[in-house]
Structures are given as C-alpha cells and as structure tokens.
Image (cartoon, grey):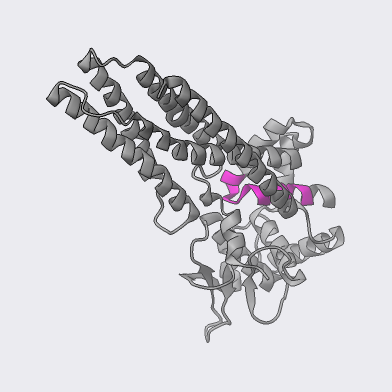
Amino acid sequence: MPTSKDTKKKNSRNNIFENSKRDAGIYLFVYVILPIFAIVFTIAKKSNNNLLAYSFCYLSIMINAFECLYDITNRWSREKSIKNAKLFWMAIPVIIIIIYSLSQFIGTLMMEKVLFNFDWIFISYSITIFIALFDGIRCFSRDITLSNNA
Amino acid sequence: MSWIFYVIFFALVIISASIFGSLYSRQEAKEIKKEIESDISVDQMKKLEENLTAFLSKNNLSTNSSLDEISRVLKINIGKEVDIPTQADLSMPDRNGQRWVTFKYGLSNQKRIFAFAHECGHLINGDEGHHTRPDGKNKPTVDQLADYTAAAILLPMQDLKAFLEERNYKNLKKSKKLSIIKELCERYNVEDILVVRRIREIYSIN
C-alpha cells in the first residue's frame, strides 16, 4: 500500500543540496574543510601571551560560523520537511560556536586576560559536518547511478 | 586538548559520515534503478503512443503540444493543494464539463506537473471512473499506463528522439549523457529519473 513516506524518501528536496553536485562540492570545501582547518590551527597556534592574536583566532572562527548560519537560513524552505529538520540540527552547533567565539573575543579584549577555555565546544561542529557530508555523498552517488543507467 | 585530538576526531567524523552516506546511497541507487525500469511491455508502449497521436490529431494538436494545450482540450484545470493520501486527485466533471486536479501538500513543481499530466493521461487512455495518482511503487496497471502517457505528453517521442540523434546520445560517454539528461530536465521541466526512463523507453520502442 503506497504511503506518504515514499514521496518523502524520493523527494529531492530532502537533500539539503537538492541533488546539486556543484552546491555540495562548494559547501563541503567552504563549510567543512576550511572550518576544520581554522579550528585546528586556532587550537595549535593560539598563544595566551598575545591576547590580540588570541582573540582574533576566535573572531575568524566566528565570522566563518556566521557565514555558515547565513547559508543554512537561505536553504530553509517554508513547508515542513526532513531537509528543514537537518538544517535545524546543523544550525544548533553553529550557533553554539558563534556564542562561544563571540564571548571569547569580547571577553579577552575587554578583560585583557583569558577568562575561560571550552574549546571542546568546537567538537559539536561535527554534527554539521556529518549531515553535510552525508547529503553530499548522496548527491554524487545519485548522479553516478543515473549515468550508469542512462 | 591538543590539536591532534581534534584532527583525529574530525577525521573519524568524516570517515563515519562517508560510510553511512555510502550505505544509504546504495539503497537509494536500488530504488532509483527500480523507478527507471519500465513496468509495461513494448507492445503496450506502442499502443499508447498510437493512442496519444490519434488524440492529438483528432483535436488538431501537434505532436509537441504543451500540457496546457492538451489540458484545455480535455477541460482539466489545476486545483488546490489539499491533504490527500495520493499525489493527485481528478474530480468528476462539473456541469460545464470542467474537471479539477487537486494535489497533495508538499509536492515539488516537477512532481505536480507530472501528476497533472498523469491525470490527463487517464482521460486520453479512456480510463473510466475516479482517477488519482498513487504514491509509491506497485501501482495498478491503469496507473502505470497513465504514467507512460504522461511521460509521452511531457517528453514527446519525435522531439526527444530528434534531440538525442542530433547529439549522438548513444555513443556518448556517461558524463556527457548525464549533462544531456540535466539539459533535458531543464528544457522540459521534469525530473531526471523521468528523462532517463523515457530515453530507455524510446530506444526500446525504436
């Protein structure tokens, strides 16, 4: 007996990239590869001795996170869908990172000392990475399947 | 925590996402393959093509008439989106002979167009009774035939055949075939699976 689940499964709009390989490729580079590099270099190179450099590390991460959040809001669609649910879960860690980075940036500049260190919060970005990569692979795989059967 | 921990952690996330993504994609690939395969015989396809051609010539329409023109002749109109279990529902004719197609909430534009064409297909095929476009696989034969007619309306055989021959489609590499499929999707405003299926049907008939 056919169900509405079948429509949802087959609906390309459940993929956050709407089956666009180009969109998936660019997103994975800009919002997966680059942020991972940014986070790792921040952790590796930041120095408590130079507070300006320390705070600017978090500023760069925050800017990247804002861009990611802007991208997520642009993908949001009006009707309820699995895609919107995925985007919601992608946005949560980004918002957490924005709040943390902002508080580090402002707190360090204003108080002229490192107030706290919860860098493990960046691990939450793995949720965003997981969902983006999952859908990205589906985009590429779909095109391979279509070209194999064309 | 050292930066090495973060590198290892993110690497593990990427690997696990890749594994899960690949496994899910495999399942999707099987579903796509099932959708692409024809569920009616070549003889049935030929009969439906002849039926459609006869309908078009009887109503002074060309073989590449648009869905709008065909629906005007059939007196079928686009209705609202409602909460129904099927993708589309064709009403009985009103006192002016006009019928309305209501659609399920949340269908993509391309799915709505196809569902509308499907309902037109039912009338062209001379199907009696109340018509819908069911979701999912294992549709009744009458709906499979209406699906074929819908594809024939949206992707006219002669047009598509000429296009494919012009591009020497059969001898192209897979990547080039894919870009042609994408081009056809944009040109006819249909889904890629429909285009692939239609191309296979045309080659099996001819």
Rendered location of residue B151, percent (x, y): 68, 57
Q: Residue at x 21, y 16 (%)?
A: A52
Q: Main secondary structure of the magenta part?
A: helix
Question: Between residues A74 and A94, which one lies in front from this camera angle?
Answer: A94
Q: Is residue B137 magenta?
A: no
Rendered location of residue B176, percent (x, y): 68, 31
Q: Is residue B188 magenta?
A: yes
Residue B159 visible (yes or no) = no
Residue B142 visible (yes or no) = yes
Rendered location of residue B110, percent (x, y): 56, 55
Furthest-bottom residue in this view: B95
Residue B57, picture quadrant: bottom right
Question: Between residues B6 and B146, which one lies in front from this camera angle?
Answer: B6
Quick check: B83 above or below A10?
below
Rendered location of residue B70, percent (x, y): 61, 65
Find the magenta span and give its range: B185-201
**Is residue B1 rendered to the left or right of residue B132?**
left
Q: Residue at x 41, y 27 (%)?
A: A35
Furthest-left residue in this view: A110
Q: Residue at x 43, y 31 (%)?
A: A31
**Is residue B200 rendered to the left or right of residue A39?**
right
Quick check: B16 above or below A111?
below
**Is residue B73 rendered to the left or right of residue A95?**
right
Q: Residue at x 49, y 44 (%)?
A: A16
Query: What quarter of the picture does the N terminus of chain B occupy?
Result: top left
Question: Between residues B157 and A69, which one lies in front from this camera angle?
Answer: A69
Furthest-right residue in this view: B43
